[in-house]
Image (tube, grey):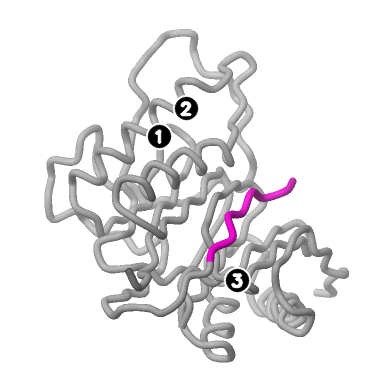
Amino acid sequence: MLEGKAVVEDTDMPAKMQAQAMSAASRALDRFDVLDCRSIASHIKKEFDAIHGPGWQCVVGSGFGCYITHSKGSFIYFRLESLRFLVFKGAAA
Amino acid sequence: MREQQGSGDVAGRRGGVIRSLLGVERRLAEGDAEGAVGVSSGKQPATEGGGGGGGEERKAVVRVVAADMPPALQRRAFRCARDELAAMPHFPRRLEPKRLALALKKEFDAAYGPAWHCIVGTSFGSYVTHARGGFLYFSVDKVYILLFRTAVEP
């Protein structure tokens, strides 16, 4: 499937890391069905744990709200296709 | 839709962190969770539910999908979630996920220390790393709630 462009809604994250989050989401959507939110979230979280150290969290879906505490410089919320993605680090490594 | 985020300088991390894949069905060791009636598969509906419930005041049905949390904390989460949902508009019924997430996170941060995170909705999946004993995924009627804790240095 061809993905559209991701749109950042809110972030506290360096630009390079933002790009990594959105490209990880694109790759996950290539690999998993759009309804398989858990696998998509798993893919993204594991990639971030591998690249940037442990403690990352990922939520994917079309209908959710949340309230979290994140480490400084490690939060992004963006839209891609029909889904919304939240990636953040809950505890610094 | 803008998320309310509290920014925190959380430095360091203790051990005892467990990975938990949502959707894995686990039965509670303790069977005394208040209001918990069995364990469902936790499959999320694909769309937002818009149906209005009946006019009767009845106790909301709480189902625990997966948990790694002491029973007392679970009961507190159930009570807090029920109270907040009951206070939300009923006609037309409207879910305010951020309000519920905020209430739960604030209560647990205050009662049990930081850092708690709460996700509320009708259609989402997630993959998280949580502190030991700090994970609860449950539903109240058709609303799914994920509450978990990440370990921080005191």
Specify whether B4 is left or right of B109: right
Toward which corner of the image does residue A81 lie, by quadrant? bottom right
Furthest toward the top, the residue is B55
Residue B123 in percent (x, y) is at: 58, 49
Q: Which residue is mark 1?
A: B81
Label 2: element kind: helix
Give amino acid for label 2: Leu
Q: Which residue is mark 3?
A: A72
Mark identifier at residue B85? 2
> Magenta span has B4?
yes
The magenta segment is B1-8
Q: Residues within 10 Å of mark 3 (few under 14, many from 20)?
A: some
Give amino acid for label 3: Lys
Label 3: element kind: loop
Residue B113 in percent (x, y) is at: 33, 55
Disc 1 and disc 3 on one polypeptide chain: no
Instruction: Give me the chain letter of mark 2.
Output: B
Residue A46 in percent (x, y) is at: 52, 82
